[in-house]
């Protein structure tokens, strides 16, 4: 992104002088059409910063919802996704499906079970496993 901003500023500076567009394109080593579009954007809007909106549907579980979901999961680590979804939906006005809940938990790196600690091997077990 930094390289593109630098290129845009070079194009605007070069076009502010009475220079031919093709010479400006050769100077900054980009296409003629790129120089024209960047200069037109600068002359219309006064800036070349891309103000593109976010794309796609907004998430049902936002940052606040993720914190709430993490609190619900921590309170009952052995609950299934369906049970967690029921508990989260009970206190909320927006209903979230199990599928969405499952993908949110994966995105948050909260997995279903806590790893189980196993006892260390005794000398007898160690000998048997090596045989």
Image (cartoon, helix red, strand yellow):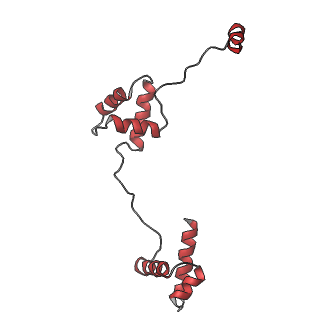
In the current view of this chain or complex, which residue is farthest to the front?
131
Residue 94 place in picture, x, y as percent: 28, 40
Q: Quadrant of the C terminus?
A: top right
Residue 92 place in picture, x, y as percent: 30, 36
Residue 40 place in picture, x, y as percent: 43, 81
Where residue 116 sits, quadrant-wise, is top right
Judge from the rendering whether residue 10 lies leftward or rightward of residue 41; answer left or right: right
In the current view of this chain or complex, which residue is farthest to the top?
124
Residue that appears at 41% across and 76% down? 45
How many numbered discs, if any?
0
Residue that appears at 47% across and 73% down? 48
Of the pair 16 and 35, the residue shown nearer to us: 35
Residue 20 place in picture, x, y as percent: 52, 91
Position of residue 18 relative to residue 109, above or below, is below
Position of residue 77 relative to residue 63, above or below, is above
Of the pair 110 and 120, the residue shown nearer to us: 120
Residue that appears at 40% across and 79% down? 44
């Amino acid at each position: 992104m930094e390289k593109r901003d630098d290129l845009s500023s070079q194009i605007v500076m070069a076009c502010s002088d009475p220079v031919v567009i093709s010479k400006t394109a050769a100077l900054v080593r980009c296409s003629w059409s790129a120089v024209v579009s960047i200069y037109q954007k600068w002359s219309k809007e006064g800036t070349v910063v891309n103000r593109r909106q976010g794309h796609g549907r907004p998430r049902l579980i936002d940052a606040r919802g993720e914190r709430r979901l993490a609190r619900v999961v921590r309170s009952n680590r052995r609950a299934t996704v369906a049970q967690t979804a029921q508990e989260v939906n009970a206190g909320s006005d927006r209903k979230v499906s199990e599928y969405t809940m499952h993908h949110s938990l994966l995105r948050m790196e909260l997995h279903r079970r806590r790893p189980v600690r196993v006892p260390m091997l005794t000398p007898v077990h160690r000998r048997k496993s090596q045989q």
